[in-house]
Amino acid sequence: MREFVAGLPKVELHVHHVGSASPVTVAELAARHESDSPVPADPQELAEYFAFTDFEHFLRVYLSVVNLIRDAEDVRALTWGVARDLAGQNVRYAELTVTPWSSVRQGIPAEAFCEAIEDARLAAARELNLSLAWCFDIPGEATLNSGEKTLDIALRQRPAGLVSFGIGGAEVARSPYRDIFAAARAAGLHIAPHAGETTSAAEVWDAIRLLRAERIGHGIRAVEDPSLVAFLAENRIPLEISPTSNLCTRAVPSIADHPLAELVAAGVPVSINSDDPSMFSTTLIDEYVLAGQMLDLDKAGLADLARAAVRQSFAGDWEKSIILREIDEYCTSLDAGFISG
Ligand code: HPA
Ligand code: ZN
């Protein structure tokens, strides 16, 4: 199964820039900034540093790694490394969540930040057969002002790969961000906020009603409200699911308690994603294999999961059709018998 998933053309819809930095990259950055960073440079110690006691602890550690990114060259190298890791898993298209305000606050000019990620995007298309797209997200743990700043960067810089706008980090109330999201929407950006990862179904409702979310990051708490589950299914609002992330941040106590199967059985559209693969010692391939076990899927079912993610993506129709055809061709080349949807 693993081999099948590894070769399957895939898209990744929920993966964070910094959370995808390979342990080697993080260790190098940590060694460079040893004097003023708690992040260990030793690989063994780094693995222990990435063992999280809960979601708050995860965020503290995540932000300490964000703090290691000090200049545009770091951003360029980080983005290229992430692209290489994704392409190595046969990912054809990825929406990478980047948090420009964290870098701008660190002293990297917005223009330089956008230039660095765009350089990596163009190189990935040219050299890795990988299309990258950006989701600019607001760091929830910062003040509302960080939302305005993130919007301002998105609208002023408008890098060519930018497709969507979100909010992550601490799960603060979404309602104060309503006007900011309305402006992002008016500027033609898709809306894909994190919501209901560790909080409640009510926050998912707010993300839909107030922010007008088209997709929800995590959203697993939706399962607590049957009317919301029905709404997501009827209105085809997908959840971006990352089972290992939810386990590592203790958003769920165990994989057996994860609501993925219940949500899928209720007809909620889902995609499978890695979120912060390096910090959770996972890959997109691992997440597909795990989701396959959780949903009791055969190869045809796994290919359908990959197709669903393509359809839910913010890629253009032409790009979607190319990846869907690649999935079909991959399945046909292995066994003409298991083509479906
Ligand atoms: N949730 C919220 N914020 C994040 C996450 C996440 O899973 N990963 C990186 N920042
Ligand atoms: Zn996330």
Image (cartoon, rainbow, N blue to C red):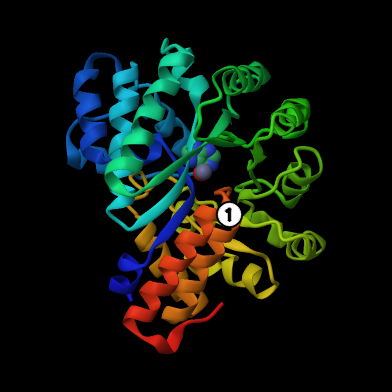
Circle 1 sits in a helix, a strand or a loop, which is it?
Answer: helix
Front in this rendered view, residue 67 or 128: 128
x, y percentage for residue 121?
Answer: 38, 35
Give the vertical position of 108 relative to 186 (above or below).
above
Which corner quadrant holds the N terminus? bottom left
x, y percentage for residue 82?
Answer: 33, 41
Identify the image quadrant of residue 119.
Answer: top left
**Can residue 55 be seen from the camera position used here?**
no
Q: Residue furthest bottom?
A: 337
Give the vertical position of 323 relative to 176 (above or below).
below
Front in this rendered view, residue 30 or 104: 104
Residue drawn 41% across and 79% down? 299
> What type is the residue that disc 1 sits on?
Asp
Callout 1 environment at 10 Å: few (<14), some (14 to 19), or many (20+)?
few
x, y percentage for residue 66?
Answer: 40, 26
**Can residue 231 be seen from the camera position used here?**
yes
Residue drawn 69% across and 48% down? 214
Give the vertical position of 337 relative to 188 (above or below).
below
| Residue placed under numbered mark 1 in the picture | 317
Which corner quadrant holds the C terminus? bottom right
* Residue 136 placement, left or right of 60: right
